[in-house]
Amino acid sequence: MKAALAPALSGGVSGAAALEPMVRTVLEALAEGAARRGGPIPAGTPQELFARVARALTEPSGFQAGRAVAEPDSGALRRLTALVAAGSADPADPACAAHLHCPPLAVAVAADLAISALNPSQDSWDQAPATTALETLLLGELAELVGYPSTAAGVLTSGGTESNLMGLMLARDRVLGRASGRRIERTGLPAGPPQARIFASAAAHFSVRRAAALLGLGEDAVVTIPVDHELRMRPEALAQALQECVRKGELPMAVVATAGTTDTGAIDPLDACATLAAEHGAWTHVDAAYGGGALLSDRLAPLLAGLERADSVSLDWHKLGWQPAAAGVFLVRQAETYASLARRAAYLNPADDEDAGYSSLLGLSLRTTRRPDAFKIAVTLAALGRDGLGRLVDTCHDLARAGAAAVRTHPRLELHADPVLTAFLFRFLPADPASADRVNAGLRRRLLREGRAVVGRTELPGEGPGRVRLKLTLLNPHATATEVERLVHLVAAAGEAEEATL
């Protein structure tokens, strides 16, 4: 009896030929699933979708292990791909506009396929020779875009949450280590004073508090700074909080400024934040996961004045960069501040290999195995350039302004503030103001249940009722102003339908 062979691999000389029919199957299934969905999100309840997925997973496989050459049946690939496509939210649909969830560029997805087939890992040179060099060069280009000097360093991350954790970890090791005279990464947090504090706005990303917890500082170490109407950190409130921290004998460890809040795209006063942090010996980290995309636009880049003063910066190219996730970037202005993360593993980056020029990126990341997400960004920049991507940013900014104008002129809608980047908050105004939160929350679920639109929901900082707001985040440069205006009117109609049920 002839022994069965293993299923084909994606690499090697024959890998491309093995992939070709499967890629065709996937493309056909994607089209089939999108047609079956017929809108921005599948209609129905979560329970109904769960049941459909469960049924599909229990269907028998076509794999026949007894064949001389054992290959998976392409029917399973097609069936499950079509299932996921039909059951996904589609950010390429103009009515899918809730989150910082971009429709990726086809060129970036194709580049991502190449990397998936080759499967390099960025933790040692001998697993990723070309992409080790490529990531290093790309990060130099991105550091220059931020305005950093040649002393900068960085790494690709899974996104803003990981980048914010890295920024605050380095701040802890550097600032608290200097104050206590200890190597924090080795000895741990000091048992006694000073108590380290992190300062972030009331609109900062939740990952700041999560990072404080993971770093052993505790969420209570984060001091919340009030924001103005447009959800920007108030610098006078930050100055007062820093002074109070020092008065109480505590240590100002880091100021986290946000360049592009998730709700409104608000940008904190970056220059003022950096100045105040420096006056108190604190680290400045800028969460520019969303707003960093403004660097691509001549129109919007001036909004990020002062970014170059930050000790560390997070960027996410899977937001205003149109990359498939993940495409996060973490940068520091001075490579020496990375010292506490450096690690030596004999099987990955022995010193004699590095002395011989076989460089490793292991000491730049929190992860060991790590795919080269830099490749798809590099391909996109090579294909479109900063100017080409900048035009996409400007288009989405124009869409947000058109959407805000449509809200402003609608008698049943209220705009919170003009868009800074590509997002804005608003709400439906029911006849009974006391029901506003219930109606706005309900109309969003109604649109999801009907499969007609994906609209965001959030709450303004503060306490009590009346804070619920709807959110449109416009990241689809192929959408038109007319389609965005149609979405605004669809929201208003859903509000009226929801109000009628009270």
Image: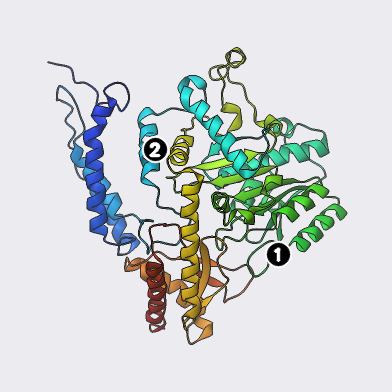
Q: How is the image coloured?
A: rainbow
Q: Say whether disc 2 or disc 1 marks the residue closer to the N-terminus.
A: 2
Residue 321 appears in the figure: no
**398, above or below 131, in the image:** below
Measured from the top left, where is residue 47 in percent x and y? 32, 60
Quadrant (top left, top right, bottom left, bottom right) of the N terminus: top left
Mark 1 burial class by Cα count in 10 Å: few <14, some 14-19, many 20+: many
> What residue sits 84% from the left and 56% below the top?
243
Measured from the top left, where is residue 227 in percent x and y? 68, 65
Measured from the top left, where is residue 370 in percent x and y? 49, 32
Label 2 or label 1, whichever lies nearer to me, is 2
> What residue sits 70% from the left and 33% below the top?
185
Residue at the extreme bottom: 431
Mark 2 burial class by Cα count in 10 Å: few <14, some 14-19, many 20+: many
- Residue designated by label 1: 226
**358, above or below 437, in the image:** above
At label 1, which amino acid type do we have? Pro
Of residues 200 and 303, the one drawn nearer to the viewer in this rendering: 303
Residue 135 appears in the figure: yes
Quadrant housing residue 137: top right
Quadrant (top left, top right, bottom left, bottom right) of the C terminus: bottom left
> What residue sits 18% from the left and 41% below the top?
75
Of residues 64 and 374, the one drawn nearer to the viewer in this rendering: 374
Residue 199 lies left or right of residue 381; in this view the side is: right
Distance, label 2 to label 1, CA atoms, is: 41 Å
Instruction: Say what secondary structure mark 2 lies in.
Output: helix
- Residue designated by label 2: 112
